[in-house]
Amino acid sequence: MNASLLNKQITQRHKISDPDILVAPPHDKEFGLFDSVFHEVSNAIAIISREKNNNSPVILDVNHHFELVTEYQLDEISGKSLYDFIATKQSRPNRHVIEKALESRQAAVLFCPWVTKSGKIINVDMTIRPFSSDDQDSKFICILRENDGGDNHRDNAAREIKRNLLAAMHHNFKTPLNGILGYSEVIMSEMLGPIGQESYKSYAQDIHGAGKDLLQLIDNLLDLKELETVEFALQEEKIIVSDMISECLRKLSSEVQKNQIKLTSTVDLNCPTLFGDKSRLQQAIHCLLTNALKFTPPGGDITLNASQDNDGGCLIVCSDNGVGMSSQQLAKTFCHDTHLSDIYSNPSMGIGFGLSYVKQLIEKHDGTVSIISAKGKGTTVTLYLPSERLI
């Protein structure tokens, strides 16, 4: 790059990244720190803006790594719509996710293929988060992470640890669990004679229910292990969407009533039948619902809707008005290197395999998963299955 072009880009970047433009004067020091990290970090980052009466987000600034990944220089991309550089066909289902995140000023993670200057399409996981806590601020940080299928040393190491853990769980957990389930069932059914105290029978039912839940978790984890192998294959069949969702709701009806949650569901008549692995898709939906139940307080609302988008694909959307996630939590939702230490400080977090399982399973169906969330504003998870999956 020649010196005059470099000076031109630096001048332009200073104008766009001026503290008076991006943040109010009291935050100048914080901006200085952000500006240093912005230009040095090894992630591709853009600052975008959503102006009033314009749904198309505009690119204000990009860092050096963004230029390396996309092959565009700042002066070639500044002031243009973000949508001009996103692969139209592959990303259209997720545009509504971007627009909802911008409109509601919530963070979002989604799959978003990017078209480089040379015309190459790179698979990208995009994170969008508000630039500041000011509700009047129209700027957002947009981070692009190349989705290489986890083909890096850190992810491979984390995945290998997980494989070893799951392999050990297969025998060491399932064998005693089968005993717990068997003996508790004997007590529940009073197979060897009456118990006497009715409360003991209730305890046996609780033990049996907890054992079944734990067994289901282990089976899901083993499924996750299989998902990461070449040999994994979907058991595909024709699925009536309304029936599949009804079965998921039925399994959770008692828990919904116990937690005093209002759960509503609608299914668009335009997407009556899917072609996919029914059992595993049900597990994915069950995971979304149980997460929503876990993080929605009594009296809260959960909705589960299935509809057909304009391109003929199927959208399954689970929304709640629960505690929501911070931008930091959302950014590592699908990471393989889940911090197990978090379980001990907050047991309700779970061990982090659920949404990773859902993402990989939906991708096996040629679909995508996106999440919009913010602290105190609930969470919306969207599963997208392409039109080729609808019959």
Image (cartoon, rainbow, N blue to C red):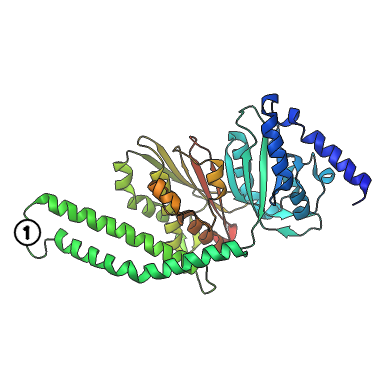
Q: With 99 as the anchor, is 356 left or right in this view?
A: left
Residue plotted at (53% across, 48% down): 382
Q: Position of residue 139 (x, y in %)?
A: 68, 34
The picture quadrant where one finds residue 178 is bottom left
Can residue 56 be seen? no
Q: Position of residue 203 (x, y in %)?
A: 18, 52
Q: With 257 as the anchor, is 317 left or right in this view?
A: right
Q: Is residue 256 above or below residue 124?
A: above
Can residue 274 be seen? yes
Would you name the residue on which mark 1 appears?
194
Instruction: In this rendered view, identify the residue nearer to me: 90 or 148.
Output: 148
Residue plotted at (69% across, 26% down): 24
Q: Is residue 110 above or below residue 178?
A: above
Kind of element beneath mark 1: loop
Residue plotted at (58% across, 54% down): 313
**Amino acid type assigned to the residue bearing label 1 in the image:** Pro
